[in-house]
Amino acid sequence: MNWLFQRRGLYTPSPFAQIFIYIILIFWTAVVLFPIYWVFTTSIKLPIDVNSGPKYVPWVDFQPNMHAWQKIIIDEGASTTFAPFLNTVIIGVLSAVIALAIGAAASYALVRFNYKPKLGLIGIFVGLMILSIVAVNLGAPIGIVIASAIVIFLLLVQTVGKRFKAHLGNEDIAFWLISQRMLPPVAIVVPIFIFFKTINLDDTRTALIITYVAANLPIVVWLMRDYFANIPIVLEESAQIDGASRLRTFWSIVLPIAIPGLVATFLFVLVFTWNEYLLALFLSTSRSQTLPILVVAQNTTRGPQWWNMSVLIMLMIVPVIGMAIGLERFISRGLLVGAVKS
Amino acid sequence: MASGETGINLVGEVQPAETFGDRVVHWLDKHASSVFVLPAMIIVLVMSIFPLIVSLYLSLTRVKIAAGGFDITFVGLVNFNKLIFGREQRHTIGKIGEPTTFGWVMFALVVLFLAWGVTRLIRKRTNMSFGAGLGATGLFIIIGLGVGYFLFNFYTIEGEPPEMGFLGMLAWGSFCAFVVMRVLVLIFNRFLPPTVKGVGPILGRLVAVTIALYFAWITVHTFTTLPNAEGNPTGIPGTIFITLYFVIFGVALQYLIGLGLALLLTGDLFGKRFFRITFLLPMMITPVGVAYMFRMVTNTSIGPLTPIFRNVFGVGGDYSWAAQAGSARVGVMLADVWQWTPFIFIVLIAALEGMAQDQREAALVDGATSWQFFRYITLPQILPVSTTIILIRLIEAFKIIDLPFVMTRGGPGTATEPMTLHAYQAFKASDFGGSAAVAYLLLFLATYVGLNFINNTRPLAEELS
């Protein structure tokens, strides 16, 4: 009997332990997959099958029926479903692309250049920002305030700026960019809402795209910085010796090598935007509604219509599950690299 | 810029004048270092830092929607006063009730734990004499109580002294005193004698301990309370403590389950990749979808678990877990655990796979038991990653809104309403100042808990490994 409890090899547990492990793993697989299965079956049930108690297996317990899919996609598609779907796709893709372009450039620069922003100048900048907010509140016209703040800042940079000695380094800038991820969005969303309302951009895709670019930038910097740091510098040096400019090196040497990382980060950011609820809740009311908002809005006065909701949830999660399967390797690497180094 | 001129190269040939596009490229290239990093910085400044400052300002104002814009009046700390000591106190902090025996036992355990922590801390700081430690503690209690007494007696909100009790006085008083002292130390650091400099960290820990005591006291007086004549609990927890409930219990469960799964999946197993991808899925699903999924699956009359609810728990039909405060909180927390366990799982499994192999092999050859193997080989190697990943999850967990919003609408009453939802409801009621104040309280709380977590677990992790 001893063989039952004997380790089979360095990385192979004993048969008894293996059975035990499989029981737990299969249990958790059921915990993960069953809710998804239940949503799928609910989406192909008739209302009476949903309301008359649990029916588990299609064709055995109930006859599958596509009425909810037909209602959501064909009957109501043009009027309610497609617009939020399109909004989510446009907002997601555009904000991911912009965030990736800006974030990749910044993270590359933070790996390859040396920055020494002076503490004093940062202090002056923040001070001027606070002063201008106060001035605007005291009734000064916003244009004049911004213009004079910029002029004063440039003047101070040219005059007293050279005298400051204390400065920050690349790590500080990177930490500062990444730490924005830690900020609770609710702490900044009210001013953003007021800001967009003031410039008549509230409830537009543009507003959401700009906001999501800002929200996703930290993740892009976090993931891409480690990716760029692992690209050997030799390639860039030889390109520069051959006379390639900095931009040229970045564009034709570094970016092609970094494509796998860029794709992974792009998908990662896309998933975040696809699922995001809080910012969309504050910033979109009707025209720029995204899918999560539409799903929540399904809770009608007649009680939740589970079958319709299930169809919408399936529409939301199928693309993401596809991405998860493709992304699995990247995600574990990306998350770990950040976690280990910080 | 020199790039604009017609150039003569080394051989002496006259080069054609550059086009406008060339000039732009040249200029960009010359300032490459700024061009690369400035867009990101400007976006973060405009969309995060600027709103953050405005938000702080808004939290000190009353905002009214006026014709064609907003009418903003500065009102000082009124919004915060209202939330912590005033009209909204029951919403934010909770309604104090009479604790049960279980509550008192939990409180005693927390006190014992904190006392153990303080003794350890003072014993470890051997460079500080016993007298200095005692003096610092005494000074701390005197100043804390003094400021607290001042707050309690001379500081009124809407004509009434704030309601806070002895521990509250000590906690709020010492916190205010600590902030003032910290600023003074920052300014006058170079003039301080060396013996006094060591007092700073001790004072910081004492404030943290007092605040933890205060929070524990409020928790047992709001979560675990005796029922009144109608059978309803007398205490009602406020949004701060509901947020902490989700954060602490949720993240603890996520870590334990994630670690367990990761440990099970490190060996050579058939179907490893399948399990890994499956376990990853919940993290990718939109939280709104997860919330509805949970409502469907845990429905007690038409959900798939109806037989279990009926036969094991003896409930069904009209019963709904979402109608009871306790079960509603557990339900929301479990949905959060379902969704975010993968995050911890996937990082831990990558860390376990990246472990140094030689130690493992040596330990196995030497015949280490499974527990010894875990305690002395695995644990030390994953502790640093664990503290980081728990910190990330802690900070993310403070932002929870989607799940309670969809699952229970924050109800029954405010039983599942976290601070983000509180802020949203203030926003919906057009109380922008109040909303910003709640958001800033959340920011303070998250930062404070995060910092304390890091300060206290990093040394512990180093000690264990």
Image (tube, rainbow, N blue to C red):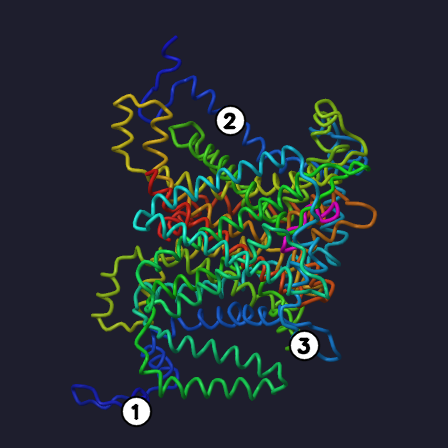
| Magenta-tinted stretch | B411-421
The reply to whether label 3 and label 2 mark residues of one chain is: no
- In the image, residue B307 above or below residue A176: above
Q: Position of residue A8 (x, y in %)?
A: 34, 19
Q: Report the amino acid beneath label 2.
A: Ile
Residue A280 placement: quadrant: bottom right
> Which chain does tag 2 point to?
A
Q: Which mark is residue B27?
A: none
**Residue B366, magenta (yes or no):** no
Q: Camera-side residue: B160 or B263?
A: B160
Q: Which mark is residue B73?
A: 3
Q: Camera-side residue: B380 or A78?
A: B380
* Front: mark 3 or 2: 3
* Front: mark 1 or 3: 3
Marks 1/3: CA–CA distance = 55 Å
Identity of the residue drawn at 32% across and 31% down: B376
Q: Position of residue A261 (x, y in %)?
A: 40, 54
Q: Report the amino acid beneath label 1.
A: Glu
Q: Position of residue B267 (x, y in %)?
A: 38, 29
- Crowding near the residue tagged with mark 1, few <14, some 14–19, many ≥20 C-alpha atoms within 10 Å: few
Q: Which mark is residue B5?
A: 1
> Which chain does tag 3 point to?
B
Let me know if residue B401 appears in the view: no
Q: Label 2 belongs to which residue?
A: A24
Q: Camera-side residue: A249 or A154?
A: A154
Magenta region, mostly helix, strand or loop?
loop
- Crowding near the residue tagged with mark 3, few <14, some 14–19, many ≥20 C-alpha atoms within 10 Å: some
A265 vs A274, left or right, is left
Q: Secondary structure at mark 3?
A: strand
Q: Camera-side residue: A56 or A302?
A: A302
